[in-house]
Amino acid sequence: MKKRVVSLIMVAALAASMFAGCGKKEAAETSSEGKVLNIQCWNDEFRGFFEQHYEGYEKIDDASGKIGDVTVKWTETPSKDNAYQENLDRVLKNQESAKADDKVDLFLVEADYALKYVDTDYVLPVADIGITEDDTKNMYQYTKDIVTDSKGVLKGVSWQACPGILFYNRDIATEVLGSDDPETVQEAVKDWDTFTATADKMKAAGYKMTSTVNDTYRTYSNNVSGKWVQDGKLVIDDNLMKWVDDSKKMVDAETTVGTSELWSDDWNKGMFTENAVFCYFGPAWLINFCMHGEEDGSVAKAGKWGGCVGPQSFYWGGTWLCAAAGTDNADLVKDIMYKFSCDEAVLKALVEDNDQFANNKPVMNEMAKSDYTSKVMGGQNPLPMYCEGAEKVDLSNLSAYDQGCNEEFQNAMKNYFDGNASKEEALELFYKAISEKYPAVELPE
Amino acid sequence: METKRKGFNIKTRRTIAYIVLILLTIMCLFWFWVLFVNTTRTHSQITTGFSAIPGTNFMNNWKSIMDGQLPVWTGLFNSFFVATASAVLTTYFSSMTAYAIHAYRFKGRKFIATYILMIMMIPTQVTALGFLELIDKMGLDNSFIPLIVPAIASPITYFYMKQYLQSSMPLSIIEAARIDGAGEFKIFNTIVLPIIKPAIAVQAIFGFVASWNNYFTPALVLHSNEKKTLPLLIATLRSADYLKFDMGKVYMLILFSIMPVVVVYLILSRQIVEGVAVGSVKG
Amino acid sequence: MGKKKNTNKRVNRYNYWGYVFLIPFIAVYIVFQLIPLVTTVYNSFFEHYREGLMEIGPNFIGLGNYIATFQSPDLWVYAKNTMIMWVMGFIPQIVISLILAAWFSDNRMRIKGSRFFKTVIYLPNLIMASAFSMLFFALFSDGGPINYMLMDMGLLAKPFKFLSHIWSARTLIATMNFLMWFGNTTILLMAGMMGIDSSLYEAAEVDGATSTQRFFRITLPVLKPILVYVAITSLIGGLQMFDVPQILTDGKGEPMRSSMTLIMYLNKWLYSKNLGRGGALSVLMFIITGILSLIVFKMSGYNDED
């Protein structure tokens, strides 16, 4: 506890941008093409796709490449501790005063905070750089909702969609519900009340319904009827309060393992037959990344997962491309954004080579009709479900406050679930956290 | 008191001492074992549970760190450079400052001594924002200078040196040296420094370790991968995309980062441990 | 004061060297610490934060930030949490360190392998706090090995959620701080003991003093300057406690913020880039630390004149 420089992790990055000047936006000048194309990202996923699928790109090293005589520079800032956003805030605010070759041209955002950038003049409308409504017509609507600003202007594009489904354990389904058939299971989880009732049945048979209360949060929060902040005032949606009440019931009835975080060790345990839980919520990538398919003893290796749509539709994950205002490479930026969101050849390649769920309805519907089956899912073809889910996701109630509010809401409610606070106390804690994060937001009485 | 009880007899006390020491040793070394075990396991094994028995994935994790995109050897060099330079500067100049307060009677001495004690109480974070603004203005962004030079003014090291001088540096020795005609700098460098060597070793270790493990300031200042120190590289690895995220690699890089500092510690700690064994250094 | 007057004139001639030796420290201090400090204090009088990418302020609001800080009990709650967790870690730390130092310095104990023990105790400090917290978290998670062990032994019927209970969470944090820093303290004390003339111990032994007496009559008084140093720096470090609870509780200070420390609270304001509230909190923390340190100085009878 003594002589050390305390590592104030969060401050670190954000301070970096603190004193950056507050600049006004400058109109996009597309007249001349700059020599350097600057791309801001938080990992190498998109760069990998780019190297593989963007014609004419010559890779120099991991941080740079060339397209014709334009140098492409990748700046990778990890998203840990908010560092990516802090860095992005700083460069965007410096955009006006930066030298042409240092101006950021293209940057990547995630859904949780996309609106923070999209709803400012730092991002160019896609129409302004030359991507038309006709180009974007085949995209899934929700992928456009996420990057549509408060005036209804589309400001970003994505190559992928990440619709989620409910994965259930086939053995448990057969034992408790009498069948592992997706339709039977769907009937048992068709809405939240049925879901909770099924959880009690699972308990009676000695199984837990979910691994943690947080498993279901995303599904509830994707289906709210209003934004987090309305007219400057914080509003907690009924569907979120329903999550609180349903979850509290499940914790008290011990039909869920606990209140651990997603990704935690405790959360992972249910992926194995020994500690199996009935279901998980997730998109396709949950299989590759979380289900331990290569490991002995995992439900995935035994091919014992099944999939059904679940109580409500939701999505999880995804990356969007945004063109920065002030870019000096507008034509090139347009071409990149177009290729990685509208060009069917590139999108098909992404599906085939990189297991992406492409953001293009005709392409995906065609794939859904194929005889593709998933080994992990015992030979089921999940694509039609994803396609159906992706169409149903409605994110018109997204706001720039989502990331902060959702995080703090789950944090605060954990105290209620764990019995450390009453519901009112937990809500008070949530309000306090919001007042720290967003001083200008008015709190409910 | 003395007649009533003489304390435990020496054998009992020794036994208690051994039990306590062995328990503490286990508590201290246990973490290194767990860390090592985790470097031998795959991501999947680590996320599904804890194990006290090593797995077989050590070489794979090692290779993926070495062949990965992160410049770990450069990071090692950067960390080494920054930590060594700060440790040297902080011990040398703090000793010098402490010596100034300890050995000379000048106007304002008391004020300066009190003032330094006061600034010691300011948490590092409190001034971080101002610090960064300054770095930007001075054009020292993405440079090692803001990580190294401020080590010269370390009130806490100064305070320790002063306390140490107070208990083991009689002014008469300095007097004698002056009579021999030695200059003030020479006295400091050739007489004072050797006497406080154990204290310097202690603060050099602490300074080196603090700088080596520091995440806060480097994260503010360093942006490019070639400049990053090891803790920043670990953070980079931990924030990797979910498809690439690999705890086995993370633990391997942590081990890679800890081993050099363990070696440096073992070298420097001889100074202290042997010093204690000899008993008195006092002249 | 009397001492000063008696100082020999010859010495006075050299005294200006004191200024020369202070130059590097003071120059670096002014540039890298004083200027940033002044900025921080200045900021505390302004309303100045960001919402998304929008910057609000700076508007001068006088003591507004201070008033707002005092209007909620948070500052005191988190100060109390910080102090509780510091004391929980510091007391065992100082006791164990003193005992170890006494054993190592007692030549009648003749502890075998003492060099090994002396070396090992500092090792936990070499693990980065973040890595250490990760390991601790895995060990004490709801389905972690500690819970399995306790259940196998029949001590628990179902997993104990260590991080969901106020006192177990605080105890874990205090334990980690203890493990990380007791070796550091012991090393400081041992280095301090080098100043002790071994002939003192020999004389005491001849006089038939018990080891307890030797400890309290010889070791402790000589160690006093170092003990004051340990107490003060540990207090300052304790008030700055951040990384361990931050990582162990994922920045939340759960449950119900009972393990939230002052710096974690400061961090919350800095997240919204609230320079005003953050600045005010910084200034208040400085004052709190100053008062507490003054109390320790006074209690220890610390004397700045040699």
Image (cartoon, coloured by chain):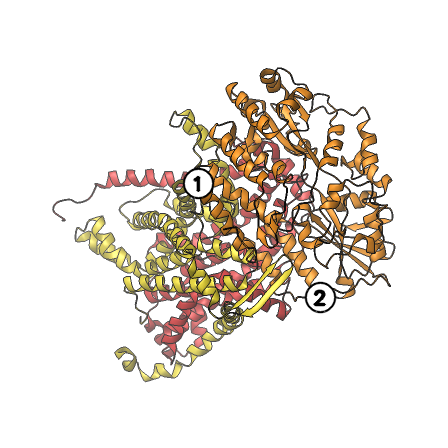
Which amino acid lies under the numbered mark 2 shown in the image of this protein? Lys
Q: Position of residue B150 (x, y in %)?
A: 53, 66
Q: What residue is rendered at 25% in x and 52% in y?
A: C215
Residue sitting at the far left:
B3
Chain represented in red: B
Report the mark closest to the observer, 2 or 1. Answer: 1
Chain represented in yellow: C
| Count of all numbered marks drawn on residues in the image | 2
The picture quadrant where one finds residue C12 is bottom left
Chain letter of mark 1 equals: A
* Numbered disc 2: secondary structure: loop
The answer to whether one can see residue C300 in this image is no
**Which quarter of the rendered picture does the C terminus of chain C lie within?**
bottom left
Q: State left or right for residue A315 relative to residue B117.
A: right
Q: Colour of chain A?
A: orange
Please determine whether, in this image, residue A8 is positioned above or below residue A306.
below
Please determine whether, in this image, residue B188 is positioned above or below residue C170.
below
Gap between marks 2 and 1, in whole Å? 46 Å
Q: Which residue is mark 2?
A: A24
10 Å crowding of disc 1: few (<14), some (14-19), many (20+) = some
**Which quarter of the rendered picture does the N terminus of chain C lie within?**
bottom left
Q: Which residue is mark 1?
A: A422
Which amino acid lies under the numbered mark 1 shown in the image of this protein? Ser
The picture quadrant where one finds residue A240 is top right
